Structures are given as C-alpha cells and as structure tokens.
C-alpha cells in the first residue's frame, strides 16, 4: 500500500515537472531527505531514483530554464574547491575502499549544493525549496514525534520510517536537524505564499515544532537538546516581545520537565558529569588522537581516516551511578572509533586546508545572513518584509548545526549543504534585486527593480 | 499506522504544494513591478507577515 502510494506520488511529481521543470529540483530535495527508495521495499527500491531525479533536475535546468538570472557566488566556489580537495584526498586516502564508499555520496551532496543556488532565481523558488525541505523532514519527524509520545523512544531505540543508521535516519543527526528547522517552520508559517498565513497553517507549524522538540527526547540525543537551547537563546535577539517569549518559554519548560522520561534525564546528567560517560570519554580520546594525527598528516588522511585509531582511555565511574557507590576506575581500549564531531571529522579527513575551507564556508554563511538581516530589517515596503526574517531563520538553523557538529560527525550532511545552498541562493537573489535601482526623491520605500524588462528606462537621476 | 499517517499527511501537503506551484507564474519569473505609488496617497499599511 505504502509502496504503491509512494510510487504514485513520485510519478505524479515527475509528471508535473514536465510543465514546470523546477519541480524536479524540488523532487530531488525530497528524495535526498526522505529517501523514499528506502522506505519502499519493492517498486521504488528497484529504480536508481536519486540518479534519475538528479538527471531530470539538472537536465531540466540546462535545457529549459532561463539562466539569465543565475549567479555563481563565491561560496559555491568554496564548495567546488572542497569537492576537488576531497576528491584528491580520496585518491591518496589511508583506507581507499572505505574512503571511496563515503566519497560516493559526499560528492553528490556537494555538487547539488553548487547546483541548487543556480536555480533559485525567484522569491517563490526560494520559498518552495524551504517548504519542500521542511515537509520532507516532517515526514520523519512527525512519525518519530508521535512514537515518542506513545512511549516508543529510547537511545538508539526510536523506530523511524527506515531502520537504518544513515542520513537523517540516524538519531543524533535527526535530533540536530529537527531542532534546527524550527526557525524555518515559523518563517514559512508567517511569510509563506504557497500555504498562506491561516490558522490551519499556524496549527500545523505548532504541531510540527512540538514534534521537532520531541525528537531529541525520543532519540535521547543530547546534541538535539543543545541545538534547541541554542536556537531558543539566539532567537532572543530578534523576537519582538522578549518578555513574553521568555515567560512562555520558561512555562513550557516547567510543564514539559515532569513528562520527560527518567532515562532521558539520566542521560542528560552525563553532560555535566562527562567523565562517567563512555561516549564523552571516547570523544575526548578521539579528538586528542586526531590532533596528534594531523601533526603527522597535516593534509588529512582522506575519508574514514579514523579507522586507524587505537584509543586507550581512562573511564571513571562516578559515585551514585549504576556501577555502585564506590568510585572505581579502569582503562578501556578501543579501535576505529568515529570522530563524533564535524570539526574533527573535517580535520582528520581533510587536514588543515579542508578544515579551513569548511569553516570559511560555514562562517561566511552566518556573516551573509547577518548582512541581509541588517540591510532589510528596517525596510517598510510590502514586498520587503520576508527577507530579513528568512535570513534570520537560516542563520539560526545554521548556528544550531554548528553546535550540533561539535558532537556529531555531520560535516558533509546533505540537508545542511542544502541549507547552505538556500543561503547562497538568497544572497545572490537579493543582491540582484537590490542592485542600483530607480529611486525617486522623497520616496521611502525602494522600488522593486528585479522584474524590470530588459529594455527598461535607465535609472532616474537621484 | 503512525508511519502511514505521517507519510499521507506530509506527502499530501507536498502534492498540494506542487499543484499550487503549477499555477504560479512567479515560480519562473518574479512579477513585474507595479506603478510607483501616488506620493499624495497615505503610506501603505505594513502588516506583520504580509505576503
């Protein structure tokens, strides 16, 4: 039943794309996030869906789309550089076979992040991509949130649509992404035109936000909670009624705490007492190993270079834990432990040049969104109200990712690369429409120059 | 059952969004700018979340 439904949905989307080829780009975003070929067990699974849809999206843009307004931004250039660098490091990787397996999906995500901004030529396209990204993540989040409410959660125990540990179906990654999309959900609810502002839209946004907040609880992923907390604090900078926001937030927290499962609060306790937590001890040991590794290999060891590590770390059992009241200690030896951090993943795999490239890509995104926010927030024109809030939402989501990446190896997470692509698209679009434009003396609001026909009159003298 | 509910709800919304996009000309080209506002007219009322 689900199988046929997904097949019909896919066929419908592809068919609609014949009229508006940009829908194929949207469909690729959906396929990349939901991976319906994994949800389906028979019909779609037999088709190389991702490849077919990418060919449609790229081919549709190449053959049918107007490219006059497409711009190549320097951040896309950075992604290209990163792509080439990763390709080279794969050729000389410490573990060639494993590196090739990771390269097989990383290059696609990077290529799509370069391609997507080229298609984002209109405001509606930017909104449509954001909407498809949110609804696609919602497919996983709603299911996970409902199961959490019904008691199906637990560390590595929450059953999602697909029983796999890859992509967004990995608990910590999903918790991070679920928390990070909350600002975008509210931007769509307030400024969306595909589903315009309406009480039903607000209700859906509320329910989806609740489901997103349930994911860190359901997966017992502490990172997700940190990301949500980060967004809640940073949002203070932009909310209009700060006092009300803080009061409602505190109230919601107080009401929620009694409903949080004990296993979750116990797990949260290890954030403070990290020495007693094996996962935290492993992280510290791997990070220290990585720093030593790049001293000898400053250019990195290629994908999956962590496989070469052998860790020996001391585990301290804190008083009052299940192990007993007496404080005991012992050494644990471990091999091939993953980086457990996007930053160290980048450092260990791509070395200092890769990390610098990657950090530049991230930080310039935050800076660009800040620039847009400052530039547009004081404008009063009817078509100038959505830009600053979108930049703020993208910036908050990105901040949440950067916090999440401290503890989860998600340096090349395709969803985040898509988010970066939307930032590039928004930056390039606003730069284009905000180019020197006809502006009359004494006119407060700027005229919208974008859609002026090619033969438009030259700008009036100011 | 829960999975089915989530799939039907979100895929229904995705399909509806795609259907609505089909009839939107501004998907491929931003609308032409309107005529300049009359300078004697009162400034437009800006609503929060104006679409």
Image (tube, rainbow, N blue to C red):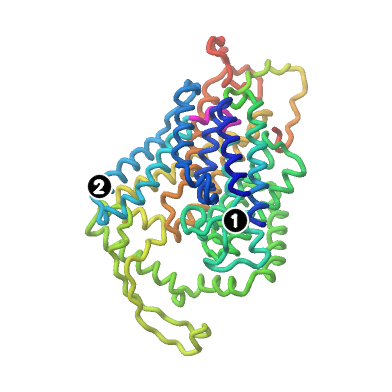
Q: Identify the residue at horizontal 70%, vertical 51% (top origin).
A: A206
Q: Position of residue A116 (x, y in %)?
A: 48, 35
- Tell me the element at label 2: helix
Task: Answer left or right for A454 relative to A138.
Answer: left
Which residue lies under the disc numbered 1? A233
Range of magenta residues: A119-125
Tag on residue A63?
A: none
Image mark 1: chain: A
Position of the C terminus of chain A, as image quadrant, is: top right
Label 2: how many Cα within 10 Å (few below 14, some 14–19, many 20+): some
Which residue lies under the disc numbered 2? A91
Q: Does residue A377 sit above or below A305 in this rendering? A: above
Q: Identify the residue at horizontal 41%, vertical 55% (top origin).
A: A342
Q: Position of residue A289 (x, y in %)?
A: 30, 65
In magenta stretch: residue A120:
yes
Which callout, 2 or 1, points at the residue further toward the start of the chain? 2
Q: Position of residue A120 (x, y in %)?
A: 52, 31
């Amino acid at each position: 039943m689900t199988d046929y439904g997904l097949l019909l949905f896919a066929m419908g989307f592809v068919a609609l794309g014949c009229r508006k080829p940009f829908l194929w780009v949207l469909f690729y975003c959906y396929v990349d996030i939901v991976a319906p070929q994994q949800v389906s067990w028979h019909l779609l699974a037999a088709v190389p869906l991702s490849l077919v849809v990418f060919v449609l999206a790229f081919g549709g843009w190449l053959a049918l789309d107007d490219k006059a307004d497409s711009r190549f931004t320097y951040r896309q250039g950075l992604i290209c550089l990163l792509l080439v660098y990763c390709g080279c490091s794969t050729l000389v990787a410490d573990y060639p076979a494993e590196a090739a397996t990771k390269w097989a999906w990383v290059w696609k995500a990077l290529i799509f992040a370069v391609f997507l901004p080229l298609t984002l030529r209109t405001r509606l396209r930017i909104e449509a991509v954001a909407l498809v990204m949110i609804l696609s993540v919602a497919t996983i989040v709603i299911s996970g949130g409902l199961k959490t409410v019904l008691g199906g959660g637990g560390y590595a125990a929450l059953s999602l649509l697909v029983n796999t540990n890859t992509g967004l179906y990995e608990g910590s990654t999903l918790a991070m992404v679920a928390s990070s999309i909350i600002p975008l959900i509210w931007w769509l609810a307030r400024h969306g035109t595909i589903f315009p502002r309406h009480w039903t839209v607000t209700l859906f946004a509320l329910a989806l936000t609740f489901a997103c907040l349930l994911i860190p609880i359901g997966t017992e992923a502490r990172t997700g909670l940190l990301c949500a907390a980060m967004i809640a604090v940073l949002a203070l900078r932009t909310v209009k009624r700060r006092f009300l926001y803080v009061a409602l937030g505190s109230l919601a927290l107080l009401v929620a705490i009694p409903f949080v499962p004990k296993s979750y609060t116990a797990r949260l306790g290890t954030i403070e007492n990290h020495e007693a937590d094996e996962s935290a001890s492993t992280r510290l040991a791997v990070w220290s190993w990585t720093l030593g590794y790049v001293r000898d290999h400053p250019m990195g060891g290629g994908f999956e270079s962590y496989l070469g590590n052998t860790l020996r770390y001391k585990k301290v059992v804190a008083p009052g834990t299940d192990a007993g009241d007496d404080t005991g200690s012992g050494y644990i030896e471990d091999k091939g432990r993953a980086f457990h951090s996007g930053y160290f993943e980048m450092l260990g795999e791509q070395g200092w040049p890769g990390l610098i490239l990657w950090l530049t890509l991230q930080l310039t995104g935050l800076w660009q969104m800040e620039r847009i926010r400052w530039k547009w927030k004081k404008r009063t024109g009817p078509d100038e109200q959505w830009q600053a809030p979108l930049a703020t939402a993208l910036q908050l989501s990105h901040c949440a990712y950067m916090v999440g990446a401290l503890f989860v190896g998600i340096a090349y997470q395709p969803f985040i690369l898509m988010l970066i692509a939307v930032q590039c698209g928004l930056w390039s679009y606003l730069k284009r429409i905000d180019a020197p434009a006809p502006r009359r003396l004494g006119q407060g609001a700027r005229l919208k120059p974008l859609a002026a026909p090619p033969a438009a009159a030259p700008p009036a003298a100011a | 059952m829960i999975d089915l509910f989530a799939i039907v709800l979100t895929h229904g919304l995705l399909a509806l969004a795609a259907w609505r996009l089909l009839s939107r000309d501004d998907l491929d080209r931003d609308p032409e700018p309107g005529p300049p506002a009359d300078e004697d007219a009162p400034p437009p009322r800006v609503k929060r979340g104006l679409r």
